[in-house]
Every structure is written in structure tokens, then in C-alpha cells.
Image: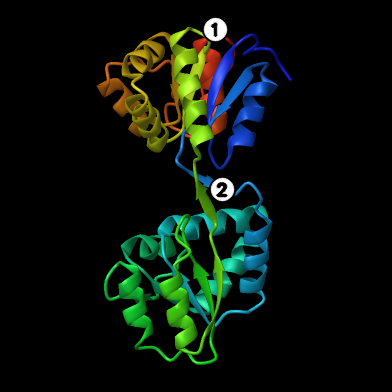
Amino acid sequence: MTDRLANLTILVPESRELDLFAGMLEGEGAKTLRCPLVTILDLADPAPVEAWLGRLVAGAFDDLILMTGEGLRRLMGVAGRAGIKDEAVAAIGRLRPIIRGPKPARALREIALSHGVGAEAPTTDGVIATLAKLELKGHRVGVQLYPGNPNAPLLDALKAGGASADAIVPYRYASDSETAAVESAILAMAAGGIDFIAFTSTPQLDRLVKVAAERGLEAELKQGLGRTRIAVAGPVVGKLLEDMGLTIAAMPESNFHMKPLVNEMIRAVGGSSPRS
């Protein structure tokens, strides 16, 4: 451990690699304030998803219904952390995915899988209409759903077709209490209680702006971002902030990852870290 970021309070966005990023900063002596700056989060307990993936890998499914691209990405994230991503991708490759629309199709391409049966329309009704044309009797169907929608019509359609469904919701939406935490972070920045805020993606900035608008804190957000050093992992979110009239204090020149970002934050406060 070093103390190159000692006595600094850094607002760290909730992300898939939150603990890793926060640990890097804390290893440099910083105090981190973790904040849910995204609206879509991994489940607090990954055990149900891990168990579902275990059944997938073991060959328990004949077909797979993907309702959202985010769902597949979250499944792959859990599979990766469990050390079975390659096996999960191979298992999906042996199935017949039924996809609700272009977003799950894009997520399939991201794992080098391009096959799949597209729904007649990118809706639950479209998926059901497509299922009606497929032979499902006796099939075991893995179903990826999304939060807040148990989708009884879809599950009932599978049952009516003679199939058994094994459904999983692999992510959740931020709660009211987590939105309150974002509000508190905005007020803390406005009061000068945050030394750095680190953005790693544009949805984090979008959520910050949205919560400020919902809670009537636009002035406080502007004040807070104006007095808080801003670190960004890459030029996309950096340009959005610059378009808002804000100054970027730290951004890697080319290697847009967490460690180079930490190094640039050290440089910004006068540390000796070499440019990555």
C-alpha cells in the first residue's frame, strides 16, 4: 500500500468491477464512497443465477429464451466470475435461442454466437407467436426474464405448448434507497466533501443528471461537479462532461482501463505515478 491518494475522498460508481476499482484507490490511501450510479445492478446474491447457469452448462435445457441483451450480459458476467464462462457460451451454442429483439441478438454476437430465432415482434406477444410455430412438447426451456415482470403469459404459453420452463432474472433495478444515496452524493459534492468523482461509463453520468432533475438538485449538481475533480476512464464520457462546460482532471491517454485511470488520478494530485 502507498499513500499517494491519502486524505482524499473519492466517489466511486457502482459497477461490475466496483470492488476491484475501489480496492486500487484504497490501496493508494484514498477513502472511497461507493455510490449506485447505474440503474441496473447485479443481484445482491448471485447464488440463484449460478445455480441456473450450472443447469445450463449441465445440458438441462433444449431451448433458451432471451428477453434482453442486458440479461445475457449479466449472465455472462456471473459465469465469468464463477469460472464457467467458456462452458456457458458453449452450452448456449448447442441450444436454439429464441430472442425478443435486436438487443439480445447483439449480446449473442458479443460472445461470438450469431444464430437464434428472432421473435415476430420485439415484444412478449411476438415471442409467444414465434413459440406457437415451434415444436416444444417435452422441451426444457431456459428463460431469461427481466426485473419487475414475471411474464406469466410467456410461461403459460410454454406450458400450453408442452414445455417446462426454468426462468431466471439475472439483474435488478436500483431501489429508492439507492436513489437516495445518489442524492446524498450530489449534496456531498456541492458541500465540498468529495475530492474526486470517477466515471467509467456514460450511464453513470446519465443517472447522476437524472436523479438531480428528479430531486430538484440541478444547481447543486452543477456546483458539485464544478468544485470536484473529475476522473474519466475514456474520451466518450469525457466529451459529454466537457460539453457540459466541465474540466477533466484525469483521463488515460490511450489505455482506458482502471489501473491507468488510478495512475492519472495520482498525477492530478501531484503524485509520482508515470503516465500509462
- On screen, residue 25 versus residue 177, left or right, reads right
Amino acid found under the numbered disc labelled 1: Gly
- In this rendering, the answer to whether 140 lies above or below 13 is below
- On screen, residue 13 versus residue 105, left or right, reads right
Q: In front here: 166 or 6? A: 166
Viewport quadrant of the N terminus:
top right
The percent position of residue 213, horizontal first and vertical second, equals: 32, 26
The percent position of residue 54, horizontal first and vertical second, equals: 67, 68
- Tell me the tag on residue 42: 2
* Among the two numbered marks 1 and 2 on one chain, the one whose residue lies closer to the N terminus: 2
The percent position of residue 248, horizontal first and vertical second, equals: 38, 18
* Element under disc 2: strand
Which class describes the residues within 10 Å of circle 1: few (<14), some (14-19), or many (20+)?
A: few
Chosen colour scheme: rainbow
* Element under disc 1: loop
Q: In front here: 129 or 113? A: 129
Residue beneath label 1, please? 270
Residue 36 visible: no
Amino acid found under the numbered disc labelled 2: Asp
